[in-house]
Image (cartoon, grey):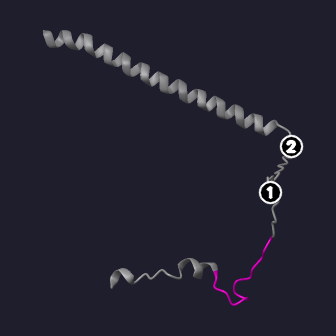
Amino acid sequence: MALKLKMSIVLPILLTIIKLISLKGLIAGLMALKFSIFTFLKDLFNKKQERVTTAYITSAQPVNAEIVHQDWHRNGQASPQELAYGAYNPYATLQ
C-alpha cells in the first residue's frame, strides 16, 4: 500500500520535472534555429559591401622598416627547416 502511494505521488512529480527540462531544451533549440535562419536570410539579402581595413602603424620613436627577401638556398645558407631542426637527433633517445 505504501509503495503504491509512493509511486502515485513521486512518479508524476518526476515525469513533470523531465517534461519541463525537455521543453526547455526544445524551446532553446527552436530559438537557435530561428536566429540562424534569420542571420542567413539577412546575409543573403544584404547588398555586398566592400570592406576596407586600414592599419596605421604609430610609434614614439622613428622606425626604420625594411622588407628583406632572402633566398636561403642560393646564398649558401641553411634553410629554415635546417636551422630549426639542426640540433634535433631522433636517435638520441635510443642510445
Residue lying at 80% horizontally and 70% vertically, measured from the top left: 67
Q: Which residue is mark 2?
A: 49
Estimate the x, y position of residue 81 in percent, counting from the top left.
59, 79
Residue lying at 18% horizontally and 12% vertically, measured from the top left: 4
Estimate the x, y position of residue 65 in percent, counting from the top left.
81, 66
Query: Looking at the magenta stretch, what is its main secondary structure?
Result: loop
Q: Quadrant of the C terminus?
A: bottom left
Decide: is 78 above or below 32. Answer: below
Asked whether residue 8 is drawn in magenta, I would say no
Of the pair 86 and 3, the residue shown nearer to us: 86
Instruction: Say which amino acid is labelled 2.
Output: Gln
Whole-number angstrom distance, CA of label 1 to CA of label 2: 37 Å
Decide: is 38 above or below 19. Answer: below
Q: Extreme front residue here?
A: 61
Instruction: Say which amino acid is labelled 1.
Output: Gln
Q: Secondary structure at mark 2?
A: loop
Estimate the x, y position of residue 38 in percent, counting from the top left.
70, 31
**Circle nearer the N terminus (1, 2):** 2
Characterize the local packing of mark 1: few (<14), some (14-19) or many (20 or more) Cα atoms within 10 angstroms.
Answer: few
Snapshot quadrant of residue 42: top right
Q: Is residue 55 left or right of residue 92?
A: right
- Which dot marks residue 61? 1
Which segment is the magenta one? 67-79
Decide: is 47 above or below 61. Answer: above
Estimate the x, y position of residue 48 in percent, counting from the top left.
85, 43
Q: Quadrant of the N terminus?
A: top left
Q: Secondary structure at mark 1?
A: loop
Residue lying at 86% horizontally and 46% vertically, measured from the top left: 50
Snapshot quadrant of residue 64: bottom right
Q: Extreme left residue here?
A: 1
